[in-house]
Image: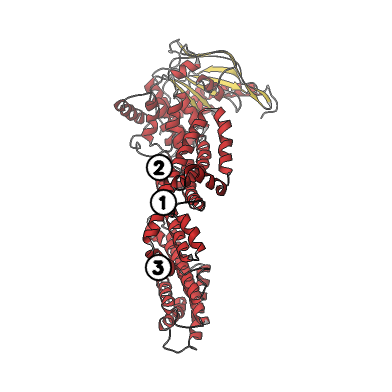
Amino acid sequence: MSQLQYYLAVVAGGICAAALGFSLLTPLESGLLLKAFLAVGTLSLLRFVVPLGLWIDGAIAVFGAVALLTTLGVYAPTPAFFWLALVGAWLFSWLFVERLSHALAWRISDSAGLGLLIPVMFGLTILVIWEVVTRAGNVPQVILPPPSMIGARIMASLPTLWADFQQTFLKAVLIGYVLGCGLGFVVAILIDRSPFLKAGLLPLGNFVSALPIVGVAPIMVMWFGFDWPSKAAVVVIMTFFPMLVNTVAGLNASSVIERDLMRTYAAGYWQTLMKLRLPAAGPFIFNALKINSTLALIGAIVAEFFGTPIVGMGFRISTEVGRMNVDMVWAEIAVAAVAGSVFYAGVALIERGVTFWHPSVRGA
Amino acid sequence: MSVTTELSNPAGTTTQDAVISARHLGLTFKTNDGDVVALSDVNLTINKGEFVSFIGPSGCGKTTFLRTIADLEQPTSGTLTINGMTPEQARQSRAYGYVFQAPALYPWRTIEKNIALPLEIMGHSKSEQDARIKRTMDLVNLSGFEKKYPWQLSGGMQQRASIARALSFDADLLLMDEPFGALDEIVRDHLNSELLKLWAATQKTICFVTHSIPEAVYLSTKIVVMSPRPGRVTDVIESNLPSERPLDIRETPEFLEIAARVRDGLRAGHSYDGDHV
């Protein structure tokens, strides 16, 4: 057991013991589950006599979360021991993740499923703390609604959210992303062929990327109308430059020796491009694709603040904020976050397949 | 213990048709610090089937000379012909295979795909490619590693793969620029004796750049000693070692005599500039 784990175990058990002591001041039959958790947490101090497996820490953490969530609303002004119990449960979850990651560090490659458990546990801990703090602390919903309320809103508004997702993500983001990245790639190859274009187009691309999105978006609406094409145009402008710069850099990434080799074979420009320079540029191109996957979503949502039909994620956020329907705003944020993460993960997965040979992927 | 090598074309029986012919060859690099004379008045003829080593300290122009033969550098004066052609024509007709200091295998290609690279570029058919890959991989003792990626092999195996790649399209001339410079001595000895066998089996003309006197003497039929500032040829030594060269030939008086002559040549070159150790 490392020093950090040692202190975590001591403090977690100690806090549970202290909270158990305070909880005896309340009527015995109230909040029984929470008191049971505190008792178990206190008993965990016995680990210094009998070692406890890391899964027991995980089970205690989950038990604590369940106990806290079911005890919400039992006590009218939230007593101090309740907050102590929250801290205790959080520490058990931390201790569990800490011990799990230590255990996995020795054999990380053949336990990818267990490795996934760490971020899941981390996310769940945040959600539980968020839920308990907002509800037990009576945080105004306009400031921060509890996740359960956001979840309920998502379930109740699925058709609206789906329509918004379709409008913003499936149309503006994806089409703009493909066009912007494709254009950046093609222009990079054209630039590479001609020093004149390199001198002329690279600064122009830089100029376009420096345009403020909030200024460009209304102009795109003038040019391409209210519907998704104007948003896709904003996405094209945002994604074009990162792709251009990365591809230009990537095309120069092959080493002198690798290019000399092609020259000794009397290989033509296109042969050298296809067999050496494009594969060598792969890691750079995928960097741009990953950066752009999140930029595109941001661009499309912000662009919808400037004139749009009555559908779309950005439109929904701007109108629901005005109507103080903050739970709907959070629901859209959740959808956008999940969509953006999945998009990014998809690109990253393809990257692993295509640039498997690169040291950053094969872990050399 | 000792590796015996049968040489099919011992020194002295070479035919007199010149593969490489340099006359008053000079090359000056223009840099921000002024001109650097990399090659000055180099005169040299290399005949078919010879194994020629270029030896000298850093900056003596041995690599530059090899790169000039390969049309990777352009001479600024004099003439250079390869099989009677200009270096550019020779490169366009794929007259030589070049082995660099680093293996320069493409990491996204398996070993067999790396060896197929020149064959793809030169437009060989798929079945022809497969036959040549098999033959050259046998030649460098890499059979069984076809599907491996370069980064899964040791440095010595990578360099062998790069030699196989240079052999795959059957050019008569092999240019090797310190191919074993980055390898440890044991691997290097092994690859040296393998290279001699390969030379005997393929009858190619080989130009071999090296830092190492034993390596040069062990391999060559002709040793070109060069010296720096400006890069020039100071001595050309014909080796009279027997065609059969086990590794322990390096202990014999004949071998040591040639090595001493090479060392003298290197020292003579150095006496021009006193600032060098």
Position of B257 compared to A33: left or right? Answer: right
Counting other residues with Cα less than 10 Å from the Cα at mark 2, is it few (<14), some (14-19), or many (20 or more)? some
- CA distance separating discs 3 and 2: 40 Å
- The residue at which mark 3 appears reads as A152
The answer to whether mark 3 and mark 2 are in CB contact below 8 A is no
Counting other residues with Cα less than 10 Å from the Cα at mark 1, is it few (<14), some (14-19), or many (20 or more)? many
Asked where in the image residue A101 lies, by quadrant, the reply is bottom left
- The residue at which mark 2 appears reads as A354
- CA distance separating discs 2 and 1: 31 Å
The answer to whether mark 1 and mark 3 are in CB contact below 8 A is no
Q: Which mark is residue A112?
A: none
- The residue at which mark 1 appears reads as A167
Vertical position of residue B12 compared to residue B140: above or below: above
Comparing A326 with A352, the one in front is: A326
Asked where in the image residue A30 lies, by quadrant, the reply is bottom left
Comparing A129 with A235, the one in front is: A235
- In what element is the residue under mark 2? helix
Q: Nearer the viewer, mark 3 or mark 2?
A: 3
Comparing B124 with B57, the one in front is: B124
Residue type beneath disc 2: Val
Please give the name of the residue rendered at 37% of the width and 61% of the height, measured from the top-left corner. Answer: A158
